[in-house]
Image (spheres, coloured by chain):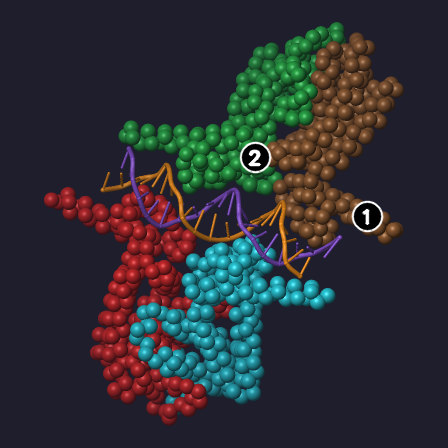
Chain colours: A green, B brown, C red, D cyan, E orange, F purple
Amino acid sequence: MDKAKEKVQRFRAREQRILDAALELLLEHGEEKVTVEQIADRVDIGKGTIYKHFVSKTEIYMRLLMDYERSLAERLKVAVGNAEQGDITAPARAYFESRMADPGKDRLFQRLEEKIIALNQAPEMIAELHTIRNAIASALNRVFERRMEQGMIKRVPAYYYYSTYWALVQGAVELYHSKSFADVIEDREGLMEFIMGVGVHIGDISSRKPQETSHSGDIAGPSFG
Amino acid sequence: MDKAKEKVQRFRAREQRILDAALELLLEHGEEKVTVEQIADRVDIGKGTIYKHFVSKTEIYMRLLMDYERSLAERLKVAVGNAEQGDITAPARAYFESRMADPGKDRLFQRLEEKIIALNQAPEMIAELHTIRNAIASALNRVFERRMEQGMIKRVPAYYYYSTYWALVQGAVELYHSKSFADVIEDREGLMEFIMGVGVHIGDISSRKPQETSHSGDIAGPSFG
Amino acid sequence: MDKAKEKVQRFRAREQRILDAALELLLEHGEEKVTVEQIADRVDIGKGTIYKHFVSKTEIYMRLLMDYERSLAERLKVAVGNAEQGDITAPARAYFESRMADPGKDRLFQRLEEKIIALNQAPEMIAELHTIRNAIASALNRVFERRMEQGMIKRVPAYYYYSTYWALVQGAVELYHSKSFADVIEDREGLMEFIMGVGVHIGDISSRKPQETSHSGDIAGPSFG
Amino acid sequence: MDKAKEKVQRFRAREQRILDAALELLLEHGEEKVTVEQIADRVDIGKGTIYKHFVSKTEIYMRLLMDYERSLAERLKVAVGNAEQGDITAPARAYFESRMADPGKDRLFQRLEEKIIALNQAPEMIAELHTIRNAIASALNRVFERRMEQGMIKRVPAYYYYSTYWALVQGAVELYHSKSFADVIEDREGLMEFIMGVGVHIGDISSRKPQETSHSGDIAGPSFG
DNA sequence: TATGAATGAGGCTTCATTCAT
DNA sequence: AATGAATGAAGCCTCATTCAT
């Protein structure tokens, strides 16, 4: 009885170890340059064993992708809830912080998804991924609609806000990773706060006095979400 | 005498044709999926001939990269000049427009550079690339410094502006290309104008009445450049 | 006591289920393309359990082969008995009908045997298979000998009849299966009867004057069976 | 000038050597058990070189198949011509002799075709193959039609003759190869002539009174071709 | 006794680069 | 100078069989 459960658990654990190892290697060596054999070696199992857990290498990657997307969605759901309770910048910050928590990882997943789409491997899983993403987008759009109705942000199609904010965060992720900027950026923390400030205030209709964004964004005013 | 010159010219012309063909193919099929053979076929020369012009496939890509970067620098230099004559948003717009002129191409070059860096092929050429980029950055930074001294934009390290703007454009490029957003974005032009508006006004210290950026950015106020 | 018997019975039953499942799958998917895992899944047992019953995958196939051959031999033995009672075409018909009863199956076994021989797996079992087959052949040969003595079929080595008939049936089996002929053959039943007719009358010596077959064997008289 | 021609010739020659080597190996080891590497080794070239000549392993096999089928068609065309000049058995003999000239090879091609069809690789080439075959069949059918009109062979659908003859030859090929019969058959030549005689006279209407074939087709008279 | 996770050899294919002509 | 045939390392995936539980 117990034995069976234990076995299943060990199986799941190994699956996780495969995923972990794959992620590690991807972060270390980049999307290309990770082979199934490397993954197997790192987990210290045979190549074939990988295929007991995953149908293909792509499926491993898709799993990583989905897990990441889901955790992002989770955090955003909470933040959207908070926004409805008044903390209007919560989603913007949650989104920014989630994705910037580990920019390398975020970027990796961008690339991974892109490649899988380009080669048209696993189109159904990609569709599923987009479903998750769309659910988030809808929730955010509702927040924007409300803010627009309240006259706090400029009236434009709601997706302008989501898209623009996405673009900014996307760019920030790339910036973080960029070798070219590495030498220039002395105060990365500060810069990121600055960028987040910009993001949070997209579309703001300010009747207020000039922002005193001394340094970190006075993240508060009306905003993204 | 003349013959020699002609020969050299033909040689150069063919080199350009190789570069053009490579770019075309890269845009058509993506970074992975272009082979030296395909390039040779499109130029209608032998594979071996390619290696008379370029030491490796990577070198072809590096040349494309450099050419792109140089043309970008060129346009920016002009715009920085204009900024110094008063058209303060010129560099921001020039940068945005240059990169968004063909987002697919811009993105391609991002990926290419990244890949070359990752595999650490051609480190010296990469260094050269960064030199070009840094020259631009310096010029821009001087523009920002001046605006800050004039109290038109918030006082932060100058590279904050450059970096943030870069991030936004970078993100816009990705957005343009993104399959996930493709369905959502109905008015791409409008969105891009909106994003540019955001970029142009980063850091603005507005004592003025709320922006009426009805739609396209009332690109004017103090800004990026 | 009883328990033990029951156990043995259950064991045997399962063995049969494995064999049945294997045959089904082979017919569905072809020789290559059936895995041990598929068989286990269909029987709803573990892969390992299969190896409690059979030493190897080849052994499963060999068992199927032997069973088929034995049932064929059984039917032929009866028919040879009938031939001795006067129904001279009984063996020919029995043989034809047995093999044509399920041409797909018959063909499958041909292929299986061939493959096992080619890879020289299980040479002793193959030898045993041939022993069964030879027993049949001998019985048939005796029938032919008698017919020749009676002057009903042409006098040639007895195995000519057996072999030729085998060839014809073999060919009919292939014909049945052939994709190329599928479109052409409108009346399969009619064709098969026609072929059987040919087979049954191989070597017949008609009451007519001998054929002057320019080229080779002139054929006539009652036949194979 | 000449150099180029020479080069092309050497290229073609190598292609032929690949085909030859593949055929040799297939005959030696059977369809399964021949790897691309083996072929390359035998020709003493690199594995990759094979793929300069052929798109895939399947294509090599298809080429062998087509070549074989074409040579068969060629010979039959001649024989059908002869049949029209009076040598009525010419096609039957040509067909039999062609296929029996190297039964191992003939059988190999049967298997190869079958496998390629089963795995649905190269469906267009298979279609082309069948086109060749159908052309032959049509020609033969016309011969049969005429014989039936002349009252020399039994009146049945024309494809009965073609199919039955095909079946017999097919079976003879298998017989030739069969390990089980190997020990039994002492006079192979004689047997083959015997079988061909059977084939040549399928459907013959002798000058004698019709056979009372209890069961079905009564067979006799000049035939097939 | 039954299980099924683990194994790893082995097969096909791709493509940047070389080099003889 | 131009060619393109040849190379071979490297990658993904399959599956019969084993063996610890």
Which quadrant holds residue A46? top left
Relative vertical location of residue C151 with respect to residue C133 in this rendering, above or below: below
Quadrant, the C terminus of chain B: top right
Relative vertical location of residue A114 with respect to residue C51 in this rendering, above or below: above
Relative vertical location of residue D17 with respect to residue B7 in this rendering, above or below: below
Which quadrant holds residue A198? top right
SS of the residue at dot 2? loop
Say which residue label 1 marks. B8
Q: Nearer the viewer, residue D204 or B38?
A: B38
**Residue at the outermost bottom position:** C209
Say which residue label 2 marks. A31
Q: Nearer the viewer, residue C110 or B194?
A: C110
Which residue type carries mark 1? Val
Q: Is residue B35 left or right of residue D137?
A: right
Which quadrant holds residue D74? bottom right
Residue B210 in the image: x percent, y percent? 78, 13
* Marks 1 and 2 in Cβ contact (< 8 Å): no
SS of the residue at dot 1? helix
Rendered image: mark on residue A107: none
Residue positioned 48% across, 36% down in the render: A38
Residue A56 in the image: x percent, y percent? 48, 40
Q: Chain of mark 1?
A: B
Which residue type carries mark 2? Glu
Q: Residues within 10 Å of mark 2 (few under 14, many from 20)?
A: some
**Residue at the outermost left position:** C1
Q: Chain of mark 2?
A: A
Number of numbered callouts drawn: 2
